[in-house]
């Protein structure tokens, strides 16, 4: 699923990846680590970056869809949160544009919309902007798409592929994301959390 498909889905109001409750892995890190810099990759409406900012973190959200970034800005203003928002594609945006020293980075399904070359470029950028010891949280789909097919189906990304994309990182854990309630045709798609730490 490419950038055009995401834009169409936002226009249609079909955004099953959107959520207001923060993912458990993100909550755990923010509660245990000293406040640092957080990067939300494919931030959507920005709820996670906003929450991090309200916990005292310096948060940046990036998304390729202008509608999503506009919503994120409005949500941050309503919440009184100071978040840096960027409209950009994680596979083409430069590390200089993103900044550096991120201690927590999060991808909630953004990689599912990238082809293999885009994933390699995105991974290189993520590696460049992460601080040593930085944590990367990835929400990814596994084998199959839960009955969803065609251009709007998420691409899977399982642990061996993640290891190959991030050779300078160790996997802290990989577990099913059964607590994530997907809606519509994606409700049965196998999904998992992967958390990595940079050497």
Image (cartoon, rainbow, N blue to C red):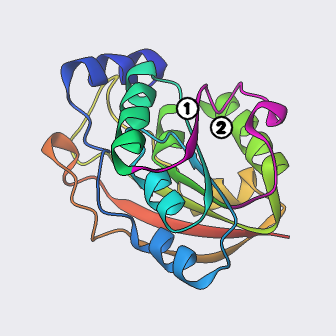
Query: Which residues fall within the magenta stretch?
Result: 80-103
Q: Are marks 2 and 1 in contact (CB under 8 Å)?
A: yes
Report the Cα–Cα distance between label 2 and label 1: 6 Å
- Report the residue at 29% width, 24% height from top: 10
Instruction: Point out the image quarter for the N terminus.
Output: top left
Nearer to us in this view, 110 or 80? 80
Instruction: Say left or right for 65 vs 134.
Output: left
- Report the residue at 36% width, 34% height from top: 74
Dot 1 crowding, Cα within 10 Å, few <14, some 14–19, many 20+: many
- Report the residue at 59% width, 69% height from top: 195
Q: Seen from this angle, which residue lies furthest bottom? A: 32
In terms of sequence position, does the residue under pointer 2 or pointer 1 come before the other?
Answer: 1
Q: Which residue is mark 2?
A: 119
Give coordinates of residue 81: x percent, y percent.
47, 50
The relative height of residue 72 versus residue 8 in the rendered view (above or below) is below
Q: Which residue is mark 1?
A: 114
Give coordinates of residue 150: x percent, y percent.
30, 25
């Amino acid at each position: 699923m490419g950038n055009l498909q995401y834009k169409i889905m936002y226009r249609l109001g079909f955004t099953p990846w959107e959520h207001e409750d923060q993912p458990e892995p993100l909550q755990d890190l923010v509660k245990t680590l000293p406040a640092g810099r957080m990067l939300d990759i494919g931030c959507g409406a920005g709820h996670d970056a906003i929450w991090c900012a309200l916990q005292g973190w310096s948060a940046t959200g990036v998304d390729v869809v202008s509608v999503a970034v506009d919503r994120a800005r409005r949500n941050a203003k309503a919440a009184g949160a100071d978040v840096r928002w960027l409209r950009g594609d994680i596979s083409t945006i430069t590390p200089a544009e993103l900044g550096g020293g991120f201690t927590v980075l999060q991808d909630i399904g953004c990689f599912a919309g990238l082809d293999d070359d885009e994933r390699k470029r995105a991974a290189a950028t993520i590696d460049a902007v992460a601080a040593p010891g930085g944590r990367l949280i990835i929400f990814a789909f596994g084998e199959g798409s839960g009955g969803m097919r065609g251009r709007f189906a998420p691409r899977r990304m399982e642990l061996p592929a993640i290891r190959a994309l991030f050779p300078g990182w160790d996997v802290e854990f990989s577990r099913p994301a059964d607590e994530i309630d997907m809606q519509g045709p994606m409700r049965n798609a196998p999904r998992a959390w992967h958390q990595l730490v940079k050497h």
